[in-house]
Amino acid sequence: MSEVGTILDKAHQRAQEFVLPYSGVVLPQEAWALLQALPEARLVDVRSAAEWQFVGGVPGAVCIEWKTWPGMLPNPDFLAQLQRQVDPETVLLLLCRTGARSDDAARLLAANGFASVYNIAEGFEGERDGAGHRGSVNGWQAHGLPWQQA
C-alpha cells in the first residue's frame, strides 16, 4: 500500500472509531504528507482572521472563518464561501486551533456533499503546556511543519 493509501486507511479507521460522519481524521504530519503527495488536495484553515493575522498560518491554505472575530459568531456564509473556492470532490484537510471548529466544519461539509473531508487532529496550535501556552505540546506548529506569521 502507498503512503497515501496507508494514511487514508488510518484516517478512515479513526472516523469509524469515533463514529464521525466525514471521511476521517489525520495527524498534522499525515496532513502534510497528503498535501505533498496529492497536489489537488487543499488545506482549509477555519480559524478567525485574528488568528491568521496574529498567530500565523500555513502557506497556501484556503482561509475561511468558521466563526468570525470579534465575538466568535458563526459565519453564516462559510459553506457558500468554500463552495466558491474548492471543488466538492477535492480532498479537503480542515485545520483550526485545536481540532474542534474544524470538526464542526467537517460535519457540515460532509452533510452538504463534500466527498473527501478530513479533520486535522491537534490543530494548528495544539493543547496548552503546563504554563498555559500553545504551540509546543502538539499541533501543526509543534511538529515543525511549514507555517508563517503575517
Image (spheres, rainbow, N blue to C red):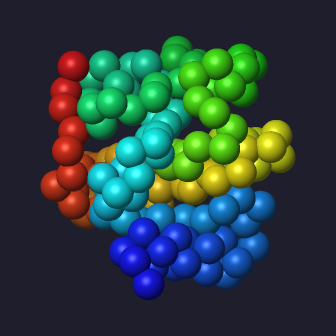
Q: Residue at 19% across / 32% down in the picture?
A: 148
- Which image quadrant for residue 68? top right
Where is residue 44 shown, x and y percent of the image? 49, 37
* Residue 103 can be seen in this image: no
Where is residue 142 shown, x and y percent of the image? 21, 57
Quadrant for the C terminus, please: top left
Q: Residue at 62% across / 73% down in the picture?
A: 12
Where is residue 81 shown, x and y percent of the image? 64, 19
* Residue 108 can be seen in this image: yes
Q: Say which of 3 and 18 sits in front.
A: 3
Q: Residue at 72% across / 44% down in the picture?
A: 114
Left or right: where does residue 64 sit relative to residue 59?
A: right
Q: Residue at 72% across / 20% down in the picture?
A: 80
Q: Is residue 97 above or below residue 23?
A: above
Q: Is residue 25 above or below residue 78?
A: below
Where is residue 138 shown, x and y percent of the image? 30, 62
Quadrant for the N terminus, please: bottom left
Left or right: where does residue 141 sit relative to residue 24?
A: left
Left or right: where does residue 17 sit relative to residue 98?
A: right
How many marks are shown on the rendered structure? 0
- Which image quadrant for residue 97? top left
Q: Is residue 137 above or below residue 97?
A: below
